[in-house]
Amino acid sequence: MSDLPFDPVELMRTNPEALNIPGGMLTASGPQDYVGCVPVIAGTLFFENAHLPAVRDAINECFEAYQAIAKPELTWLLREDPPEGPRKMAFEKAKPFKTMLASIDPNALVSFYYTSGKQVHDAGPWEFQVHGIQAWRANMGDWGLCGLRFSVPLLFVEETPDSFVELFVGCARRLHAAHGYAGHSLNLSALRYDDNQAFEAYLAPKLKGFDAGNLIAGAANAHLGIKTVSWLTAINRGYLEKVGGESTVRSELPPDWFRLFDYGAGVVIQAGARPDAAPADTAPPARLVLPDMLLQPVRTPKVQIHYASADSEPRLIGWSADEWLKRLDVPPEQLMAYKAQLLKEPKIPSSR
C-alpha cells in the first residue's frame, strides 16, 4: 500500500467508482460500457435446510441485520424461477423479503439476489444473495448445501471492521453455519456473469487473499468440506474435532494475531485486524498460511469455480481450480518459518 503513488483509502472516500472494472474485460469482444466487476469485502456462509420455516426466519434475520449494520444501497432484485412476479425488478417495487421468502414452497428453489448497480446489468458493491436447495434435494443429502453471501464496499471494512465481524458472526450463529469465510472478493455482474469470469480468473492468481467463483457453484460441493480460509473463517464443531478440537486451534493460532468467536454451532477465526489481499509477488502472510495448513484436513477435495469458455478466455477450471484451492499451502518443513514470520506481522489491537 505504501508503495502506491496515491492513498487508496482516500481514493475510496473521494472516488469509489474509480475501482470499478468495465464489463467484458479480457474477453474476445473486449471491454463494454457497463460495470462488470467491483472489488468488495464479502462474507459467505454455507448451511442446511433453507426449506424449513425456522431456517427461513434465520435467513430473514440475517437480511435485517445486513440492512441495519451495513445500510446497503440496494437497487435491484433478481430471482431464479420465482413463484410469482418477474425475475428482475427494482428494489423499491419488490415485496418485503420476509413475505416473499415465506411464500416459497418447500420443494421450490430459494433464490434471491439483491444488487446495487445503477443499471440492472451493472455490478455494485452492495449485494445480498441467498441460494437454498429444495426439500427433496436436501433430504437426499448429496446435492450440496444452501448458501448466503453479502458484500460491502472496501471502505466500510477499512473504517468499521468490527461491524463486519459482528454481522458475519451473527449470521453464522443464526444459520447454524456448517462453514464459511469472509474477505476480499469481486462482485461480478449478476446478469452478465459469464462475460466477467475472465477478469476474476486473471486477478485470482495475483492476489491470494481474494475469493473466486460464485455462491451457487460453491454450495454444490460445500457438503464435502471447507472451500478456503480468509480474514474470517467459520467452521462447525464437526470440522473442529477433525483438526484436534478448539484447544488445538487456540494453541496453533496465537491470540495476538487471531481471534476466535463462538457462534454456537462452531467458531469464527479472525486472522488479523483487517483483510489481506496477499499479493502473489510476495510471501503469503502467516496469518493466512497457518490457518490454511491447520484446516487443510477438512478442505473440500474438489471445487467448481468458473464455467468453461468457448473462446478460450481465462478461467479457473480443472487443474487451475485445483491449484487455487492450494494457493496458500506451504511445505510442512516451512511451517516453523511461518510461525516465526507471524511475530513480525501486525497484531490485532488489544481493545478489539
Image (cartoon, rainbow, N blue to C red):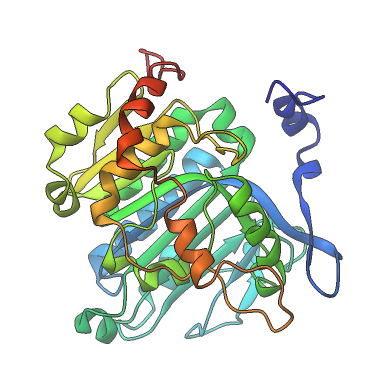
- Tell me: 224 left or right of 271: left
- Tell me, yes or no, if residue 96 can be seen here: no
Q: Position of residue 208 (x, y in %)?
A: 53, 45
Q: Position of residue 306 (x, y in %)?
A: 56, 71
Is 142 located above or below residue 30 in the figure?
A: below
Q: Residue at x 27, y 32 (%)?
A: 260
> Furthest-top residue in view?
350
Q: Residue at x 32, y 63 (%)?
A: 300
- Tell me: 260 left or right of 210: left
Q: Position of residue 64 (x, y in %)?
A: 43, 50
Image quadrant of residue 92? bottom right
Q: Residue at x 45, y 25 (%)?
A: 273
Is 204 located above or below residue 114 in the figure?
A: above
Q: Position of residue 170 (x, y in %)?
A: 33, 43
Viewer-closest of 42 and 210: 210
Image quadrant of residue 310? bottom right
Image quadrant of residue 16? top right
Quadrant where the C terminus sits is: top left
- Tell me, yes or no, if residue 208 can be seen here: yes
